[in-house]
Image (cartoon, coloured by chain):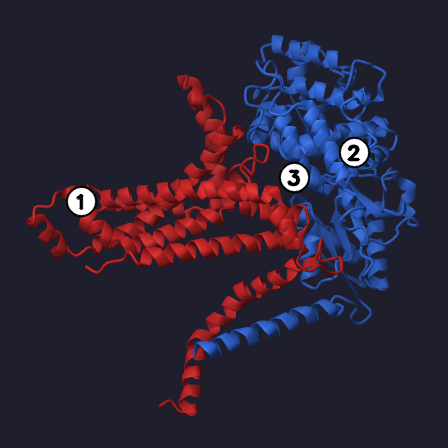
Chain colours: A blue, B red
Amino acid sequence: MKKTLALFLVLLMAVALTACGGSGNSNNTAADSNGGKVNIVIVNGKGEIASQWEQAAKDFMAANPDITVEAVSGAVGETVNLLDKLTASGKTVTIAMMSPDSIVNKYKDFGIDLSNEKWNADTVYGVKDANGKIAGFPFSIEGFGLVYNKSVVEKAIGGAFDPYSINTRDKLKALLDKIQASGVKYPVAYQTENWSVANHYSTQFLNQAEDPNTIVEQLKAGKFDLASNAVWNGYYDTMDLLVSKQYNKYGERPLGKYYDDAHLSVGKGESAILFNGNWAFDSLKAVSGESFGFIPVPVDNNPDNPLNNKIAAGPTNILVINKSATAAQQEAGKKFLNWLVYDQKGQDFLVNQAQVISAFKNNPNKVTNPLGVAIAEAVQAGKTLPFSSNYVKVEDWGNILAPDIQKYIAQKESRADLAKAIETYYKNQQ
Amino acid sequence: MITEKSRLKSLGNQLFFTGPTIIFFAIAVLIPFAYGLYLTLTDMTSPVNPIKFSGFGNYKTAFTDTAFWESMWLTVEFVLATVIIINILGFILAFLVTSGVKMQNFFRTALFTPNLIGGLILGYIWQFIFVQTLPSIGDKLGIEWLRLGWLGDEHLAFWAIVIVTIWQSAGYMMIIFVAGLVNVPKDVMEAATIDGANAWQRLRSVILPLMVPSFVVTVFLTLKNAFMVYDVNYSLTAGGPYGSTTMVSMHVVQKAFTENIYGVGQAEAIVLFIIVAVITGLQVYFSKRMEVAA
């Protein structure tokens, strides 16, 4: 009996396996055109705008009755990539949302050339693929820096505060002292999540070159000495200041799960400053009337250094059109991208509904959350640096290098060892 | 003598009853397992890219991945800590709630309740306790070891996971022990008492040997759960500080889904499977031999 059962199981598996193999080869006919209509699948990785995304698909379909759009959204914080999941289940995703670094790494053979699209004239943020062609449609602009609570800082300095007046490390230190003197015990609440200290804070040194890629290339070739690089050291000097026992709420044990606590502290005005991006606004849970802004992260004491006067901002989510979709689907996808840029409803969806900072000059709408406003103003005034994490493999930095950076913060690893860890990582990249 | 016809008939009978279960078991477990084995022999970064065959290279990478073995060793420490404490604590609790204390049914329910909360939610609740509640208590009462958040220290963060796991599963094991304790025959106990055995002797020589079947189950469950721990690990420390509490399941997930090396991640998962299967298999085999009849 056991034998027959085993045989049965083996047969079952064999059948299932061949079925798996079969579905992988057959090209999706279901998602293709039916009766002159084009079906496209558009994937959104920002779970927080899932309902707006769905509505956008409906509005787009109303304007383009010959296109059927299936809008899919990932859950907030989902680890497994939605594009992988849908592709593995046999669907062809027409438009995928991804981080800008994926287009040259994980999905380097995925997208089609979009450099001849009309919208390129209205943005400078189109993202290039490995061949130097624009393949990524900039869906959102985001930025990071030192988030500050306006009322706490203004109370401390006794008047209006211009965040760009803090353009040296000494001035930042003086500001922290002033805030402390005004009765705030710990001016800084430094949250040390791996992605924050690694992908965001620790990639800032790449901005010392006009094109951050040149430094990445030098690192890969083993020709960039971090330990003797003034800018690289400068950012960690500033970090030492921010995590110090004197100023940081968590200075005595700087690691831990402080993300929520740090944001609540700054939101309520118990602390004044933390390092994060415009998305932090959701976590600040601010009491009404509190307002926030960004101070550039100072790297040295030279007030003319552009790094001290600008905020890192750039495209963080890009839309890419799948090259294995049919020509009709690709056309429909391009239409959707144009709709986002030029149709009134599309513009409204992007900025007013989804509260995304648009990368396009022609979009007249403005986001309402104060951190978004600060980034949008910096973009308009030209006070931005590239969003440095777009030039590294964020998964690797968050997993492989973040522990070293966190060890440095906890003073369990020297800066020289940290430099070595980053250099070794890049040498292993070839 | 079994004829061909009756054999077919009995196969039909078996399939009628077990067939549906087998189908679902195959869909949810066997087929993914077989497909996973196939994936370990390939070089896949994403389903978007074509799959390339790579032989046993992934296993070689898995065996030389020091981070994998470090997380495996950490998991072994975690297994030792949780298996021992949960079983001892579960047994003591079971002993207490069958000894006839007042409201013992209430205590049984209350102690079991943590098990009804999912590991993820549990982790986030305890994260709040470790990051905010305990430090503020420590601050107010001047208790030095509570004043700083536990999750920022690699040793304390490890014990934080152990504590939450114990809190979650001790009640469950207690229920299994309660069932075992209730089933210890009254006449044997009475005979022991008449023979002059004191409480300790009764526990050691009568109750414990008769409880071996319960221990076989609880040790197996705690072993398996501890080796496979992921949800509490993820929601409580997420592997931090600086990756020091990354248990082996979390390492596998990171390899496969964040670093996008599916093949190596899957190969490491297979290695983990074999280790757990061998250890739990040996445990069940040897502890079964300790069972006695009343």
Q: Given the image, what chain letter belongs to the residue carrying mark 2?
A: A
Q: Which residue is mark 1?
A: B100
Separation (CA) of disc 3 from disc 2: 19 Å
Mark 3 or mark 2: name the one nearer the start of the chain.
Answer: 2
> As shown in the figure, which amino acid type bears the numbered disc 2?
Phe
Report whether mark 2 lies on the same chain as mark 1: no
Q: Secondary structure at mark 1?
A: loop
Whether residue B93 is visible: yes
Q: Is residue B68 above or below residue A218?
A: below
Which quarter of the figure is the N terminus of chain A placed in?
bottom left
Q: Secondary structure at mark 2?
A: loop
Residue B241: image location, x then y, percent: 56, 32
Query: Are the two marked residues, 1 and 3, in contact with CB atoms closer than 8 angstroms?
Result: no
Q: For this view, does B65 lie left or right of residue A354?
A: left
Q: Which residue is mark 2?
A: A387
Give the quarter of the image for residue A375: top right
Tell us which disc is closer to us: 3 or 2. Answer: 3
> As shown in the figure, which amino acid type bears the numbered disc 3?
Asn
Residue A9: image location, x then y, percent: 52, 73
Separation (CA) of disc 1 from disc 3: 52 Å
Q: Given the image, what chain letter belongs to the residue carrying mark 3?
A: A
> As shown in the figure, which amino acid type bears the numbered disc 1?
Gly
Q: Which residue is mark 3?
A: A399
